[in-house]
Amino acid sequence: MNRRKSKKYVKGKKPQSNNYHKARKRYALKHLKISRQRKDHAVKLARCVITSNDVVAYEDLRIAHMVKNHNLAKSITDAGWYQFRVWLEYFGYKFGKITIAVSPQYTSVNCSECGAKVTKTLSTRTHKCKCGCVLDRDENAARNILSIGLSTAGHVGFQAWGDEASILAGENLSG
């Protein structure tokens, strides 16, 4: 689609042809449709997650830093993680549910059973600890995120609607 549009572009010609402008509008409509599909999926999934849970703990991923990896940048931006996070926080606020952003450091390295550090490469998908705990790497990280999220109140995050976060930084849930 973009290749056909760029073939109609003539360098140096100030008013471009009508065919170029028609192709540009067609291309823009395709992108608009894709962005609306991505937003719709994020909204529906975030609403489903919030309504089915009382507390949602998630990793506070720095997506802007992650897209600097040129091999993964397209996949990360296509997934719409940031938009999903914004809608998750919004629906958490609207439905009165607790959303907790957990720092991503050592969530997949620490053992969820004993807390020992087990270093792994990115290609290692199984967590094996000396305490006998054998889990999938993602399940181990999810257990760590949940335990950290339940023990702390997370931090004040960015909300698109401008209100303060539903929980304060560093406050214990038991207190």
Image (tube, grey):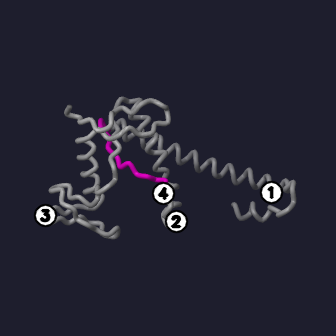
Residue at the spot of label 2 = 70
Badge 1 or badge 4: first in the primary sequence: 1
Above or below, comparing residue 169 to residue 64 in the picture: above
Query: Which amino acid type is shown beneath numbered disc 2?
Result: His
> Looking at the picture, does residue 115 appear above or below residue 146?
below
- The residue tagged 3 is 132
Task: Tell me the amino acid under the disc marked 4.
Answer: Ile
Image quadrant in which the C terminus is located: top left
Closer to viewer: mark 2 or mark 3: 2
Regarding mark 4 in the picture, which secondary structure is present there? Answer: helix
- Judge the density around disc 1: few (<14), some (14-19), many (≥20) Cα neighbours within 10 Å: some
Reading the image, the residue beneath label 4 is 76
Rendered image: mark on residue 20: 1
Q: Around disc 2, counting alpha carbons within 10 Å, would you say few (fewer than 14), some (14 to 19), or many (20 or more)?
A: few
Disc 2 to disc 3, C-alpha distance:
37 Å
Residue at horizontal 74 percent and vertical 54 percent from the top:
24
Residue 101 vertical position relative to residue 107 in the rendered view, above or below: above
Element under label 3?
loop
